[in-house]
Every structure is written in C-alpha cells, then in structure tokens.
Image (cartoon, helix red, strand yellow):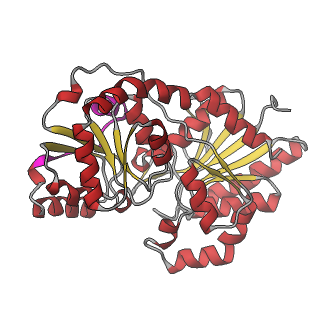
Amino acid sequence: MKTAKLKIIQICAAYKPAFVYGGPTMSVAKLSEELTKAGHEVTVLATTANGKEELNVPIGKKTLVDGVKVYYFKRLTKDHTHFSPSLLWFLHQTIKNTKRQTPNNKLIIHIHAWWNLVSIFSCLVAKLHGVKVVLSPRGMLTSYSLTNRNSKFKDAIHFFLGKSLLRYCHIHATSNKEQRDVAQTCEVNGITVIPNFVSFPQAITVTDVENKEPYQLLFLSRIEEKKGLELLFEALPTLTIPWQLAIAGTGDKAYVQSLKELASNLDIGNKIEWLGHIANEDKFKLMANKQLLVLTSYNENFANVIVESLAMGTPVLISEEVGLADYVKEHQLGWVSTLKTEEISEQIVSSYHDLSKRIQIRISAPSVIRSDFASENLVKQYTNLYHSFV
C-alpha cells in the first residue's frame, strides 16, 4: 500500500551541523527532513565527525535537528574510517526491538557513502538481521574512487566484505552518470536513479550582472584534488578575455597552499580571490552575483552546487565527469567540457561571448530548476523506492 508510513533509519558518518563535508551532508539532511514532513518515522544515526574536530552535540541521546530525530555517537577513528562501535550496537538493538514490537514493520535502512566503517559495518548488521538496505554511494563506487588514493586496507575490506555486501544492497544513484559508474565497477542488487534534494531560497534580485567586466567566475565547493582546480588554473592563463575568479570553500591547508603556489607560478594569482568558507545563507547571493560557476571535476556523482547556481539564474561550466552534465546539456543551462585544459579554456571564452545564452539562462533556469527538483515530487520517488522493498 503506497500510502503506508515507513520506518526509515538513515545512516551517515556525518550529519549537520558538520557542514565541512559539503553537499552530501546537506543532501542527507534535506532528504531526512522532507521524509519526516511527509509523515514517515525517520531516525538518523551519525557520528560526531566534523573533519578533524568533533561536533559538540549530545552523545547517544535523541536530538531534534530541524525536526528530524538524530542520534550522534563518538567515533574511535577519524576521517575517513569513522569507526563507531556504539553506533553499530545501537543499530543492532534498534532493529531487534523494532522487529519484536512490530513483526510486520516496514523498516528500511538507508546508508549514505561507502568506504568508511560506519557504512560497511552498518550494512553488515542490517544484512544479518535480514533488513533491506538502500545504499547511496555518494560517488564512492566509481573507477575514480576505486583507484585514486587506494590503499591495501580498502582493497582488503572490498575483497573480504565489501563485494558481498554490495550484492545485498539496492543502489540509489543520484544521476545517470553515477548509475553507469556503479554498473561498471560493482555487482549490486539493482540501481534506481533519483536526484538529490537541494535547498535554495527564492530567486535573488540582481541588476546587470551579465555585463560586468572583467568576467566574473566562481568556484564554490570543498577544495580537494578531485575538483580539478589544477586543470582550471592551467586553462586560465590562455584566456583571451578579461576575467576574475573567486574561490569559495575550504580544504586541507597544505593542498590549498599548493594551489596558491601554482597560481603564482602561472602568474594568475592577482586575478584569484580566496574567500574561504561561505555561510549557507550567504552563498546564494554570491552565486547570483557571478556570471559563471565553474566545476571542472575529475568525478562528481551529482554536484548540488550546480542546481543551487542555476536556481539563482547563474550559468555553469562543468566537466563531462560531473553527474549533472547530461542534464545541463539537455536543458541548455551552460557549457560542458572535457578534462583537457584547451577545451576548458575554449568553453569559458565561448560562454563569455555568448551573452544571449547567458541572459536566457538567467531568465529561464530558476523556474526549470524549481520544477524539476520540487521537494514533493522527490518525496514520492524516494517513498516509492522504499515501498518496493517492504
């Protein structure tokens, strides 16, 4: 019965206010909030992970976070393992009690991300209890993630445990690209594509943005190697147009410093503004006042920032390795490039000169995004996915 309410346990190593982890944390939170509003019984299990720090939250006690019931647990290890025996024990007890109290319960375990010990061992606990698992890998099941910075520990976990657990999971992919990536790398128990929930405010009024000089470029994301900033930096000196780049986000200090040194060596440092972390309530105004958001990532399963930018009317330039590349192409909402620096440069210049297309995106994109990513439609899709297993 499609209208029946579900008991859903969302499991993620990090939950808000751990905003240091960027889009995935926000997506899990928005999903949990919308499902709760729809009347489903949602419980989130997370660790106190907040990068190298720990969240200052109650431990092992029910905490309401924007209307969602959340339990936080201490972790014994830091990024990227997040080992938390207390979380796993709580999950075991919760499943056992739920089964005893309501034998015909409609219980679903939804795990977010892979390759950390919260996700892998939570999946094992659920499998031992015979509870269905939906897994949102969040970009962790691609050829890029399987080979980049690989370790003997990851290889061993995948060989002895990961492969069999993945065959037990039904995969929730956030884009067609992620669906293809998972199918090429893993044997799983089916794949369903449903976009992320993305939060955005009402359109922000700006004036004469498209005629600004120099051309206002924006990178807004967590600063890490997979984001392809080196590719972008190497393309920028070849541009034949006036430009300025703002970089909003944080990352490993040593890596950020290496990027600044690269910019200096390429003689473009004076055209780059490093903004650091931008509060969630400020980022939409920042996006609305830029002319092009750029994301030349080596790999992205979705990229919330693309939807956020377009919701503000700001066009995007992304690599073909970004999950939403197909969507951007289909709806003519920006420019898509390969990972070759020459083409990145060409596409930036092309976007600069195509003023009519940028103006059209500025006008039409907000309504397109609000229609395609409407919360009520996505709630139905996620609910139907869960109901198919109970």
Q: Residue 165 colored magenta?
A: no
To which quarter of the image does residue 148 belong?
bottom left
Give the percent coordinates (x, y) of residue 221: 35, 47
Visible residue check, residue 66: no
Q: What segment carries the magenta color?
A: 271-288
Q: Horizontally, is 101 left or right of 190 in the view?
A: right
In the rendered structure, the answer to whether residue 85 lies left or right of residue 354 reads: right
Instruction: Return the residue nearer the eye: 171 or 29.
Output: 171
Figure quadrant of residue 266: bottom left
Q: Residue at x 28, y 32 (%)?
A: 286
| Residue 231, position as x, y percentages in the image | 28, 60
Between 337 and 390, the one lying in front of the other is: 337
Q: Determine the residue positioned at 15% across, 63% down.
A: 261
Q: Is residue 204 above or below residue 72?
A: above
Relative side of 351 to 272, left or right: right
Q: Is residue 171 visible?
A: yes
Task: List x then y, in percent, for residue 5.
Answer: 78, 32
The quadrant of the rendering that contains the N terminus is top right
